[in-house]
Amino acid sequence: MILKKYKTIFWDFDGVILDSDEVRTEGFRDIFKDFNYQQVELIVEYHKQNGGLSRYQKIDFFFDKILKKKISKDEKSKYVKAYSNFCFDKLCKPNLLIQDSIRFIVNNFRNFNFHVVSASDQSELRIVCNKLGIEKYFISIMGSPINKKINIQNLISNNRYSKIECCLIGDSFNDKESAEENSIDFIGYNNINLLSSKSPYIFNFSNLN
């Protein structure tokens, strides 16, 4: 009954629809393999604690805050491309789909307005969803470099959605912040640390089908 009052559901992708955490983590270790091990582990830890942030923001953090160096646009693009090259094929595997949430999506996409709103690169995300055969369940699939807060804001505005009938399902505190900044409800999933936030939480979608 937790979702009964909503008409529109914004879905985070990594960790909610696709079990991609290990691939994403190893991606940062790979693109920064020529740097000091301790520094690389700092960005890995930052990545793990900030699942709702994009690779663009994490690469900036690595250079600005950890290395304390400036990075040019061309150099940043090189790392973004290298990260995508490392992750792409590894993510297009149906066995990584989180069956609990996918079953709910397949069974209910006609009953709600479903949108993917992710921190993942938008072009890559759309191709991954296509290859996994799940794009048909979503009205739109939105990602970075536009951040999640702005993408949600635009979707609500462009579709004239009522905020009281919208929610975001995510697995990170960054997702919770994106929902709160848009004055919509947040529902946690697949990260028990979110229980401390006192937000509604879904332990298992099978109970909602």
Image: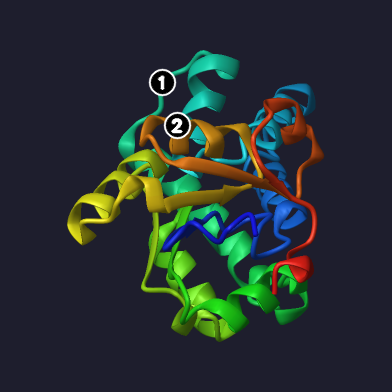
- Report the quarter where the N terminus lies: bottom right
Query: What residue is drawn where x is 61% and y is 32%?
Result: 173
Marks 1 and 2, how far apart at CA: 32 Å
Asked if residue 162 can be seen in this view, the reply is yes
Q: Which of marks 1 and 2 is nearer the N terminus?
A: 1
Query: What residue is drawn where x is 77% and y is 70%?
Result: 206
Q: Is mark 1 on a helix, strand or loop?
A: loop
Q: Look at mark 2 in the image and give the residue it sits on.
A: 180
Amino acid type at circle 2 is Glu
Colour style of the rendered protein structure: rainbow
Q: Quadrant of residue 14?
A: bottom right
- Report the quarter where the C terminus lies: bottom right
Q: Is mark 2 on a helix, strand or loop?
A: helix
Return the residue nearer the eye: 143 or 182: 182
* 186 left or right of 201 in image: left
* 150 left or right of 70 in image: left
Residue 52 location, x and y as percent?
Answer: 55, 40
Residue 72 location, x and y as percent?
Answer: 34, 31
Query: What residue is drawn where x is 55% and y is 61%?
Result: 4
Query: What residue is drawn where x is 48% and y is 18%?
Result: 64
Q: In which quarter of the image is residue 183?
A: top left
Which label number is shown at residue 70?
A: 1
Amino acid type at circle 1 is Lys
